[in-house]
Each structure stands twice: as structure tokens, then as C-alpha cells.
Image (cartoon, rainbow, N blue to C red):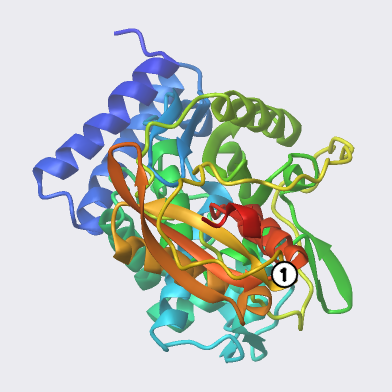
Amino acid sequence: MTVTRSTVRNGLFPFAFRAADTAGGRSSAGVGRHLFAAAALLGMLAAGAGLSAAEALAAKAAAIVVDARTGQVLIDQDADAITHPASLTKMMTLYLTFDALEDGRLTLDQQLPVSSWAESMSPTKLGLRAGQTLKVETAILGLVTKSANDAAVVLAEALGGTESRFAEMMTRKARELGMRHTVYRNASGLPNMEQVTTARDYAALSRALMRDHAKYYPYFSRRNFVYGGRTLPNHNRLMSRYEGMDGIKTGYTVASGFNLAASAVRDGRRLVGVVLGGKSAVSRDDKMAALLDQAFGRPSRGRDDAPVVASLDTTRSDAVDGEGDDDDDEVEVKAKPVRASLQTAAIPVAPAREEKSGRGNTPSRWGVQVGAFSSKAAGNKAVSQAVKQAPFLLRTAKASVVEARSGKETVYRARLTGLDEKDARKACAVLTKHGHNCVAVSPGERG
């Protein structure tokens, strides 16, 4: 038998996962046993083929781009190939942290103990010392920006007792989110042959973060934060040069190559892209930019009444200021100036019945429309999410979900009214920046 990179990559690991599925598929320990056996065989096969184990698993790049709202796959380049997540792992650590914040097991101001195990983590790290404490919000920012491995362990031990038990929690959550081929062994993404994933799985996790934890997603947009008297820059440098990008996470190990999960919004439409196995940070970023440009040129087949995935709350603490990732030694491309533009909703303003307009073109007769939906409940949800997204600008606005006709269909037009023109346009700028459909509606257009 001739053993090639393709043999190892496309034959061995899918076999391990099929065996695990046959055995029930839901036990992370079961999946791990199959992967351990696969890894042992991988070493022997790789040696015979003149490959290192890392080369055998990360021999090929993978990528996917999906519509964040509908999940429609726009680009698929070997998206089910098995590889390592590297620091993209921290996205799941943060997902479970956000879960804990939502249900009250953690608070942003809570101080967490730093163990000797957390202190022992390899760089990148914040440089924590055993016996110290770390605030939950600082840990979040450390993961998002600096990709701090020690902070990841602090969160893992707070939620799971030990990092290994937390990794089991991560794998179980992955199955719940439909990530069929992902197995976690640690909270940080540090090298472990059994810790594997696919580009498709990470597109699912990216969408889940925006859908389930919209309130916390803006953390991924932080460009830097101050810790220990140092300003730490975010490793996701593509945010500085790709219009509309506001996250999510970079990663790198020798075995994984250069990874990036990213999300960007243009004209009210949000896409999620995942690139795994890049040869350098620069080439990975360039590939992501090219794939997103290509995908933004393709129409979406999603329904207008689909859930609003990225309705994000811009509220966040500025007690600390943001930071970077684990490929920061790479040569970076100079950031090009980005043209600022007001995004407009993809949903047209349909003529409809609505409350009677007041007399004249008074300054407070403007409004914003945040979508047209097939049900009133969906419209009310969109309005509620918009208010959470821009609470200062929309705090005095009046919610209005009104039945309207769009061709032969009945839709429910969701608006917030009673604004002046400046606030209406500013609110739409905030909402569309983070993927919410929005269009400013002038007094003359309200009927």
C-alpha cells in the first residue's frame, strides 16, 4: 500500500469518526479512544510516508463561507477535512463562559483564582501567577485579543473544576451545536493530537456565538486592551483592513497552520468565513478577504423571516481596553484605510397600513425599519434586539410592528419611530455595523 498525505488525511480520521458514530457517537471519551488509536496508526503511517504526524494531519487547507442568518453554504473548500483548531478552541471556551454569565454562574466583575496549572501554560499568555485572581471580563478580553492560554485555563477551572473536565463539557456542547467532528482536550488550543475539528464545524460555532450570545459578541471586535500597564493589540489584523469585519478569532500551531474564523457585514448582510491550515498569517488573511469578497457577490436564498443571527448588543465595559492572538510574530500587511459607509437593509420598504402620520415634516417623525417578517412575533423579537443593540439612541423610540403587503405575501414590518433624522441614521449605522437589518425611514416614506 502506498501511503500518501491524502491516504492519511482522508482515510484514517474519517474512519475513526465513523467508528465512534457506530458506537453511539455522543461520548467524548469514546471518540477520544478512536482518535487515540487513529493517532497511533497515524504516527506509523506518517513515518512510512516520510511525514511528521503534524504534516500528516495538517497537509491540506480547508475553508468555508456561509450566510450567518440562514446558514446557506456559499463556498466550500474541503470543509469537512479533519484538522486542529489551535486557538480557535477559545471560541468554545468563551461560548461556555457566556452561557455561565447568562445563567448567573459567573459575573463579569467576579474574581477567579489562578492555579499553578494556569500559570504553567505556554505563551501566548498574560503572565498570571498562582495565587492571583483574574476578573472574568479581563479573562474574556485576554482570550479574544491576546489569545491568552493561562486565562483560558482560569475560566476552564472555574466552570469545570479541572481543565480536562471542562474539555468534556466543551465536546458535549459541540455535539449539541451540531459540530459532529470536533473533539476538545483542552481549553486553549495548545497542541494535542486528539483535539480536532473541521471548517464546517467552526462555521456552526461562529453562528452559534452570534445567535445565542449576541450580547457578548462585541467583545470579538475589541482592537486592544490594557493589562499590566501594557496595551495588547488584537491578533486579528484583518479587522483593520477588511471593510465590515468585526471578529472573530485567529489561531496557529505547527500542526494546524494559520487559522481564522471571521465575520463581516455589508449592505445589511452578514457572512461567516473559516480558513484553516494557512501557510502564513498574511496568506491566510488574504485568502479570507478574497473568499468573503467572492461570497458577498453571491445572492442569498434565505427567507426574509429567518432569525436575525447577528443582532448584537454594543454595551461593554471599558474598564480595560482590548488586545491580540498567537500568530503575532508574523509579518503583517500594512492596514489600508477603510472607507466608512452606511449599510442599508436588504429588505425593501413595502407600502403598508400603519398609524396615521402627523402633520408636517417634524424632526421627530423619522424612524428605522429593522426588517419585514412572516410573523408578528418575529417582528417584535427584531425590535427588541435592535433596542438592546443601540439602547442610548433608541431608548425613547416607539416600537411598531405593522401588517403590510409585499406582493402577494403578508409581512410584518418592524420599526422604531419618533426619532430625528440624525438619530435615525446613527442608529442604523450602529445596527448594520453588527449585522442587523436596518434602513432609516423619513416622514414622507412612513406610509
Residue 186 shows up from this direction: no
Which quadrant of the rendered structure holds the N terminus?
top left
Return the residue nearer the eye: 13 or 389.
389
**Residue 135 falls in image quadrant:** bottom right
Q: Name the residue at 75% across, 58% down.
A: 324
Find residue 262 and report its horizontal and vertical position in percent.
Answer: 59, 45
Compared to residue 440, the image places residue 416 above or below, namely: below
Outermost residue to the front: 359
The reply, left or right, for residue 141 in relation to residue 181 is right
**Residue at 31% of width from left, 63% of height from top?**
376
**Depth check: 163 or 289 in front?**
289
Please tell me whether residue 384 is drawn above or below residue 46 in the rendered image.
below
Residue at horizontal 62%, vertical 75%? 394
What is the three-letter code of the residue carrying label 1? Thr
Residue 236: percent from left, percent from top = 71, 49
Q: Position of residue 233 (x, y in %)?
A: 81, 59
Q: Quadrant of residue 4?
A: top left
Residue drawn 28% across the image and 51% down it? 32
Q: Residues within 10 Å of mark 1 (few under 14, many from 20)?
A: few
Q: Which residue is mark 1?
A: 362
Residue 332, percent from left and from top: 84, 38
Q: In this view of the protein, can residue 420 be seen by the observer?
A: yes
